[in-house]
Image: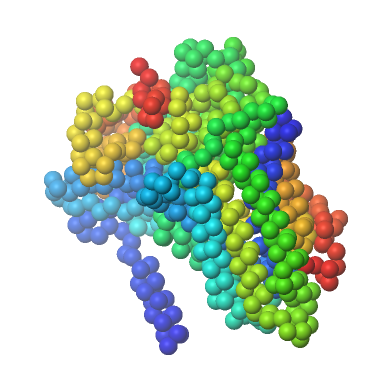
Amino acid sequence: MFLQHLLNGITIGGSYALIALGYTLVYGVLKLINFAHGEIYMIGANLGFILISLIPAMPPFLQGNLILLLLAVVLVAAVICSLYGYYLEKICYRPLRGAPKLTPLISALGASIFLQNFVMISMGAKDRIFPQTIGMQAITMGGVSFTLLQLVIIFSSIALMALIYWFINRTRLGIAIKATSADPYMASLVGINVDTVISVTFMAGSFLAACAGVMIGLYYGSINFTLGYLGGIKAFTAAVLGGIGNVPGAMIGGFLLGVIEALGAGYFSSEYKDVYAFFILIAVLVFRPAGLLGKGANERA
Amino acid sequence: MKKLLVLGLLCLVMVGCTKKGGQEAGVIRIGAAGQLTGPEAVFGADMLNGVTLAVDEWNAKGGVLGKKIELVPGDDQAEPRQAVAVANKFAAEGVAGVVGHFNSSCSIPASEIYHKAGIPQISHASTNPKLTDQGFDNVFRVCGRDDQQGKAAADFAVQKLKVKRVAVIHDKTTYGQGFAEEFKKNLGSGVEVLLFEGITKGDKDYSPVVTKIKSVNPDLIFFGGIYTEGGLLVKQYKAMGGTAPFIGGDGIMSEEMLKIGGPATEGTYATFGPDTKDIPSAKGFNENYRKKYGEPGVYSVYAYDAANILFQSIQAAGGTDGKKVLPVIRAIDYNGALGHIRFDARGDVKESPYVVWKVESGKFKQVK
């Protein structure tokens, strides 16, 4: 039973981690909590729904290759969401660069309400049901039951995290992101285009959130326009738990949050499922205000 | 220019907000309250269509007391807070009566406001006993009560399914938890309740509770709640290799349940009123509804009858004054789509036959 709860927690934790990365990356470069990030995740899920609904209209030779199609769905949704992220920053945050800290925060909340209502009006207020695509049959091994889809989700989130880790630490753009988050002014002095870096950060974060959105949509099968609220808050918690601004911290925070929730709900009572996560958050903040992996502001990436 | 635009928009908003209170001459206004938006919007639309059908029929015949009926929809989004706002709005606008709300957690707080304003309220779907047990003289319902529904579900589980071990899950709402407690109470001593646990409404991930259910290995799983959570619960339970059947109530009796849960809902039981296809008096309603809105939702006919009772009573009372209308509703012997409806002293229907339905090849069918 413990292993089962662990597996449940890791599945949901992976998506928390992917969304949390978006919070942490943006916080790293802008010192801003992008509260509209949860909505990007929700839009990703909705785009996934639209694209998957289109599958039956595809030519038959494509339909045979379901895995490839699903991959394409995730990719297209993620690319569109990157554009959302790009324009979100351009419209809501860039004009406010240099304004008092509270101003972009209010702008973020405004953007969040706007996007939520935009989806409510365009997609309707009721739950949308994902068509059943792959792997909902249970596979049982050593007392632990899981579905193929669950494995795909766990491995995809790990792969995406590896990708973003490589991107930040091994590519020129990624190193520019690290430099900007260490000191934006100094970075601009050595020839880094800070505006580009910030745009890329938003796009990368949105890309990951959209992937999480489509995967969660496929996994649970029902989505709506309010999905971003709880998803966003949980992921934000995960980012703070790991130490906001810290990339590995967000990953660990996400998985940890998922596992704590699953174990808490499993061994105590599922009535208080959301309580465990926030209780741990408070405890961590009291004893380690910078989060589990957070150190000084200078070492944040 | 920008400021002008904002000013213009504000003016528009203000014009939209100002509406005259009280009954306009020549019009009788009726409120229809339910979850018109939000995840449960399907139940809301079923209700509104049923009421609209009744209103259109009466207006085609010349209205009530020679006045046209104007339908005022109120959206409570299945949230108690919104329900109170809707009720206050209805009271301020002076509607002659209200059909709704759907969720017991909405109907109960709203009923207090209707009671103070002396507005008749006929709920089409709120089954929690407390709604009519409050002793308000203005509150009625055309559906059954959860103590009856809980007993029906428990009797079926014990006598027909012969279960020995059950897990009971609810959504912590007035309806869901109340229904679950009634079910548990009526199981008797021969049945062991292995688990009695709440889940969070609006959540998507029920894997922890599903794992728990699976580990206690019940013969039957009871769910008190609405299809949005019920569908996911069944699906996630079956995806984890669970095999025990689910039983729920009127809250999961919707096409949406089957859509959300998919093939996993096969074999799921639900308690509800009898199939309207077998009620001869509902034939006309079903045909007219289908022509206008497609297949009726399970609660459409209840909303239709609730609206008709309201109109007929206002007609018989000779006015919209609550003091005159309420005694008429209480004494009514109404012959509607659902058959005979009479209210007892509390405002509950005198006959409320709950039957059990089962999902067979992707459809809810009455167990005979």
Horizontal and vertical percent for residue B126? 43, 37
Quarter holding the N terminus of chain A is top right
- The residue at 59%/61% (across/down) is A207
Q: Which residue ends up furthest to the bottom in the rendered image?
A: B1
Does residue A99 lie above or below B21 as drawn? below
Residue B117, above or below B282? below
Name the residue furthest front: A61
Q: A68 or B125, which is in the foreground?
A: A68
Write down the quadrant of residue B139 in the picture.
top left
Q: Is residue B186 left or right of residue A194?
A: left
The C terminus of chain A lies in quadrant: bottom right
Viewer-side residue, B120 vs A222? A222
Q: Quadrant of residue A190?
A: bottom right
Tell me where residue B171 appears, x and y as whole percent. Answer: 56, 37
Residue in the picture at 69% in, 42% down: A9
Q: Nearer the viewer, residue B37 or A1?
A: A1
Residue B46 location, quadrant = top left
Residue A179 seen in the current view: yes
Looking at the image, residue A47 lies above or below residue B225: below
| Residue B75 drawn at (x, y percent) | 41, 52
